[in-house]
Image (cartoon, rainbow, N blue to C red):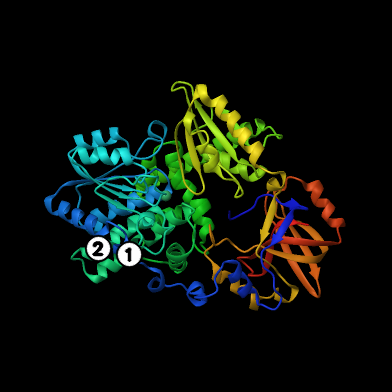
Amino acid sequence: MFQTSHIYLNMNYHVIHDNQDEDLITRLLKVRWIDDNIDSFLNPTFAGYRNNPFLLNDMEKSVERIILAMKNKEKIMIFWDYDVDGITSSYSLYQCFKKFLNYTNVSIQYPDRIQDWYGIKTHHIDQIKKKWVHIIITVDNGISSVKEAEYAQKEGIDLIITDHHHPGTEIPKAFAVINPLVSPNYPFKWLAGVWVTFKLICALAERSTLTTEIKKKIFNYFLPVVAIGTVADVVPLINENRVIVKKWLDLINKNHEHIPSSLKWFLKYLNIKKNVDTFHIGFVIGPRINAGGRIESPYDSLNILLHSGEKQIEYLDKIEWINTERRKMQEEAFKKAESMVILDDKMIIAADKDFHEGIVGIVAGRLAEKYTKPAAVFKIDEIKKTAVASLRWPAYFNIIEMISHSADILERFWGHKCAWWLAVKEENLPILIERFKAYCKENIKEENMIKIIKVDTKLYAHEWNHETLQHIEKLAPFGEGNTEPVFSIENISIQKIEKVGNNGKSHLKIHGKIGDQIITSMFRGKWGDSDDLLDVKYQEWVSLIGKVKRDTYNWWYFLDIMAIQ
Ligand SMILES: [Mn+2]
């Protein structure tokens, strides 16, 4: 999403919008469908984008109930999910109770990835009830817990669901359901789970007796954590999502003082100091918070946020180790899964007992991207005689349709815009695989599988200057729904190719000439096909496709190459 590690030679590209009469920024805004409110997009403010939390259905009711619970000293339990969005959500709500509302009768529980797969189950409610809990607040999960909501009701527990996942055909009959997708009055639908949780926090603060100053402090305090969850959950980085991420990045790059000290130390530990952008959240901070829940316990990740000092260093070291393990496991699993790929099939399927539940999704994602085909990676559990798969797919494919066709033999399936999971009895696995392959054979056309790079717009020789290029940054932060612009520069003649860097992991610096302009471009990934690259030398005229970056030391611009044609 943010970075490419492969360079493609002779790969097709498609220019989305080109008009030489418009300036660069206008063209880029058009690609993003922004034709009015241009100024509020380029200079977003909270005043322009922050929606009233009470526009969410059931918010008023939930806040009243929570305030009553605090008066009565009732036990509150936060039930969370084990990914970054879930961890940042639960952390924020828990800390808000303890630190700002001075309420300590609150605890956190999470589901077990392997035992429970996902979300709250009736057995959790039984356990929770034994602890004399009267209120459960789910964060980043719960919208699909129809049966469980009914059960909680019956058991006399008030279940407040806060979630952002798509509801199924039935909305749970819980005490309250806070979800922008079931709130017709709420104008923006794509909040991350942590933003929904944060809306509850803002609403609680609003109705509390806290001073305006403290309310402001609460907002600034949790803002970075909400930004992290938002980027890591890959929700569209537009509107309310974009403004919170942008604000935080602006603040952190100016030495923001009000953030949780645990987060300050976490960033220091990761050596993240300045020029922080969504890349750091998506590829440095996010994977580490995720690693706990993937491989070991999500409490390890939560503890990073809850502690500071010596204790935190312990957890940080542990997470660093877990994350390294995760990477190793992922590499091994990827190699093994790739060795199972049958090139003639239109769907990639790999199943093995050694795959870990926590990483099958990443492996499926890489396979789907590499082969431009839907991919399912199954972990076979020999004891439970089941197989659990994570599925990823290219944009052209309708995954829900394919899975629904096999609903009769599935134990369970669940998912969202970017990922689906399913569970099947081992005895049904061969039939399922046959059906999936048959479905893909029938529904995927050869031309679907051709890789095409989407280029925002062409970049012209006269635009290669600071005056013009500096405006690209104004579109940031980049992520899902507002991707970093990709440009094509056509008819460049290659002047020189040099290897820079060391350890044989050299980057390639390519100097190209267009008109009177010399354009420097770099290839910064792993170079797998160096023989192919040498061919480029002999190609006099090429098109370069890539992103415009700035060298952080000398501030010169270069094109970060994704493809050469
Ligand atoms: Mn989420």
Image point 51% across, 59% down: which residue?
278
How far across and down, in percent of the image, does residue 352 sit?
Answer: 56, 27
Does the closest atom of ligand 1 sit within 8 Å of the Cβ of label 1? no
Q: Could you tell me the amino acid type at mark 2?
A: Ala
Image point 58% across, 44% down: which residue?
393
Image point 68% across, 47% down: which residue?
448
Secondary structure of the residue carrying numbered label 2: helix
Residue furthest to the left: 72
**Marks 1 & 2, CB-CB < 8 Å contact:** yes
Q: Can residue 353 be seen?
A: no
Q: Which residue is mark 1?
A: 219
Q: Which residue is mark 2?
A: 205
How far across and down, in percent of the image, does residue 526 sit?
Answer: 68, 48
Q: Calculate the distance from the C-alpha at mark 1 to the C-alpha at mark 2.
A: 9 Å
Total count of labels: 2
Secondary structure of the residue carrying numbered label 1: helix
**In the rendered image of this protein, does residue 325 appear above or below residue 242?**
above
Of the image marks 1 and 2, the number of the one nearer the N terminus: 2
**In the rendered image of this protein, does residue 6 appear above or below residue 202?**
above
Q: In the visual, does 4 lie left or right of 185? A: right
Give the quarter of the image for residue 299: top left
**In the rendered image of this protein, does residue 173 appear above or below residue 178?**
above
Give the quarter of the image for residue 339: top right
Q: Can residue 64 be seen?
A: yes
How far across and down, in percent of the image, does residue 163 sit?
Answer: 36, 50
Q: In the visual, does 168 lie left or right of 534? A: left
Q: Could you tell me the amino acid type at mark 1?
A: Phe
How far across and down, in percent of the image, does residue 357 sit?
Answer: 48, 34
Quadrant of the drawing holding the C terminus: bottom right
